[in-house]
Image: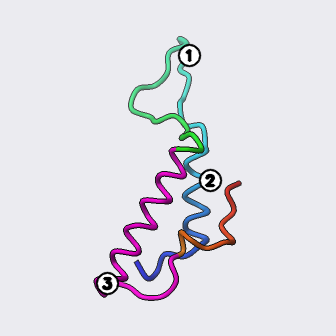
């Protein structure tokens, strides 16, 4: 947990926004590949990470500032 930083969370957000469905030659979408996440879903992911970080900090698994609550996270 202590190795996770703001840059990791920003990269995770960018990857969640990437379109990942492939269109096959016959027009059908490839199965098993998730579609891009909605902004609300990404917000839920980041909030969950923040909660896990706070739990880990409270129980002595990590220390320092919560990167998911950092004001400099770019949602782009």
| Left or right: residue 64 compared with residue 61 | right
Q: Residue furthest top?
A: 26
Residue 32 in the image, given as x and y percentages of width and height: 39, 32
Task: Give the mark, 1 or 2, whose residue is nearer the N terminus.
Answer: 2
Could you say whether the residue bearing mark 2 is in a helix, strand or loop? helix
Q: Residue 31: name its quadrant.
A: top left
- Above or below, comparing residue 66 to residue 37 in the picture: below
* Residue 42 belongs to the span the image colors magenta: yes
Determine which of the numbered discs, if any, sits on residue 61 in the image: 3
| Left or right: residue 38 compared with residue 74 | left
Q: Are marks 1 and 3 in contact (CB under 8 Å)?
A: no
- Residue holding disc 1: 25
Q: Residue at x 50, y 15 (%)?
A: 28
Residue 36 in the image, given as x and y percentages of width and height: 55, 38
- Above or below, comparing residue 11 to residue 70 in the picture: above
Q: Residue at x 46, y 25 (%)?
A: 30
Span colored in magenta: 41-66
Q: Nearer the viewer, residue 37 or 23?
A: 37
Q: Residue furthest left?
A: 59
Q: Are marks 2 and 3 in contact (CB under 8 Å)?
A: no
Could you say whether the residue bearing mark 1 is in a helix, strand or loop? loop
Residue 50 in the image, given as x and y percentages of width and height: 46, 67
Q: CA distance from mark 1 to mark 2?
A: 27 Å
Mark 2 residue crowding within 10 angstroms, few (<14) / some (14–19) / many (20+): some
Assign the magenta stretch its main secondary structure. Answer: helix
* Quadrant for the N terminus in the image: bottom left
| Left or right: residue 70 compared with residue 65 | right
Task: Tell us which disc is closer to us: 2 or 3.
Answer: 3
Q: Residue 53: name its quadrant.
A: bottom left
Q: Nearer the viewer, residue 17 or 68?
A: 68
- Residue holding disc 2: 14
Q: CA distance from mark 1 to mark 3?
A: 49 Å
């Amino acid at each position: 947990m202590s190795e996770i930083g703001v840059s990791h969370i920003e990269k995770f957000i960018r990857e969640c926004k990437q379109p990942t469905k492939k269109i096959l030659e016959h027009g059908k979408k490839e199965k098993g590949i998730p579609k891009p996440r909605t902004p609300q879903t990404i917000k839920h992911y980041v909030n969950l990470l923040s909660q896990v970080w706070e739990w880990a900090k409270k129980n002595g698994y990590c220390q320092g500032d919560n990167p998911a609550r950092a004001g400099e996270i770019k949602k782009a």
